[in-house]
Amino acid sequence: MKEIVAVIFGLGLIGNALLFVPQAMALWRKKSSEGVSLVTFGGFNILQALGIVHGLYQGDWSLVIGMTASLLTCGTVTGLTIVYRSKQQQREGRA
């Protein structure tokens, strides 16, 4: 039973990672970070990094893999937000 719960947990974490993909795609398509909270996504990144470290210490590979996938997808949202905000600030500085 413990193994079944671990597998379901791991799949849930992969599902969690996939939830960030639509936001990343919307950012990419619009080339704008309007409406995206950098504080929120930055906080998610910190929590996911802590989850990875915790998983490593506990030897919980479901947690490590799931949190790594989430960090990659959430990190993409965070990175795109930073890039588009920087470009917006540059445009505003030139105007």
Image (cartoon, rainbow, N blue to C red):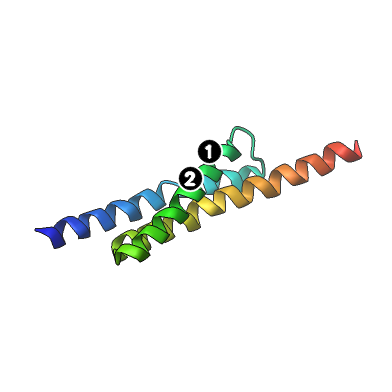
Q: Which of 6 and 46 is in front in this view?
A: 46
Examine the image and state in which quarter residue 3 appears.
bottom left
Query: Quick check: 34 left or right of 20?
Result: right
User: The residue under label 1 is which amino acid type?
Assistant: Thr
Determine the secondary structure under disc 2: helix
Q: Name the residue under label 2.
A: 44
Q: In which quarter of the image is the C terminus?
A: top right
| Residue at left offset 60%, top offset 32% | 35
Examine the image and state in which quarter residue 14 appears.
bottom left
Q: Residues within 10 Å of mark 2 (few under 14, many from 20)?
A: some
Q: Name the residue under label 1.
A: 40
Image coordinates of residue 37 in percent, x first then y, are: 58, 36
Give yes or no for contact between labels 2 and 1 (Cβ–Cβ under 8 Å). Answer: yes
Q: Quadrant of the N terminus?
A: bottom left
Image coordinates of residue 33 in percent, x first then y, are: 64, 40
User: The residue under label 2 is which amino acid type?
Assistant: Phe
Image coordinates of residue 38 in percent, x first then y, are: 60, 40
| Residue at left offset 29%, top offset 62% | 62
Image coordinates of residue 79 in percent, x first then y, are: 62, 52
